[in-house]
Image: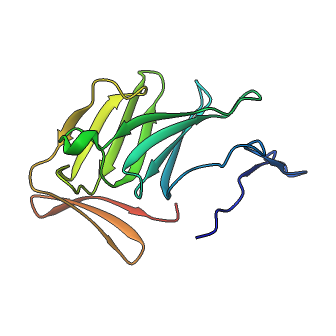
Amino acid sequence: MKELPNFRTHLGGGEKTPFFSESDTGIVGSPYCIAFDWVGRNLYFGNIDASEISLVRVEGKLKYRMLVLDSNHGNETGVAQPISIALHPNTGKLFWLDRGGSGVPAKVGKANMDGSEPEIIIKQNLVCYLLEKKVFLTLLKITIFRRDQNS
């Protein structure tokens, strides 16, 4: 599988420049969902292949990556297949929707934006699935969330 280059450009258009330096290999695995922290200037990636949520600092010359959450050896508060991420920078909270796998249940989780204090918000009777490029989250046979994959 060929890795695609990552670029940045101004919203009004113009010249695109590489986001990572030549010595940096970019993002490892398969980023599936992203969220941007406009206060801390960090870009969060939910990575299904690596079973993790990580962040990349977008300001400055050094674009460091940091692992925020991973499978935690199958711990139920870990991450298996994150399919959606939301941030609340003013309170420092990260929320994610996980399809589950390898001992990690399907859930809606919450943690501090540095990955500390992960907890489960919803776990029981939760089913997450993809159908026609849409994400469905079902709780007790009632659809409570739907999002187009392209939005």
Picture coordinates of residue 102, whole percent (x, y): 21, 55
Left or right, residue 52 beside residue 3: left
**Residue 60 placement (x, y as % from top left):** 75, 27
Residue 114 coordinates in the image, percent (x, y): 42, 25
Q: Nearer the viewer, residue 113 or 39?
A: 113
Residue at x 46% of width, y 65% of height: 149
Please provide percent x and percent y for residue 140: 9, 58
Image-based side of 30 in relation to 73, left or right: right
Q: Residue at x 41, y 52 (%)?
A: 50
Residue at left offset 9%, top offset 49%: 124
The number of callouts visible is 0
Q: Decide if residue 38 is on the left or right side of residue 97.
A: right
The vertical placement of 73 against 92, above or below, is below
Residue 43 occupies which quadrant of the picture? top right
Res 69 quadrant in image: top left
Q: Residue at x 24, y 55 (%)?
A: 100
Give the position of the N terminus as an image quadrant. Answer: bottom right
Q: Which residue lies most toward the front here?
A: 23
Against 31, residue 150 (above or below) is below
Q: Is residue 120 left or right of residue 110?
A: left
> In the depicted view, which residue is nearer to us: 139 or 20?
20
Instruction: Compare residues 145 and 33 and report the one nearer the observer.
Output: 33
Looking at the image, the residue that sits furthest to the bottom is 132
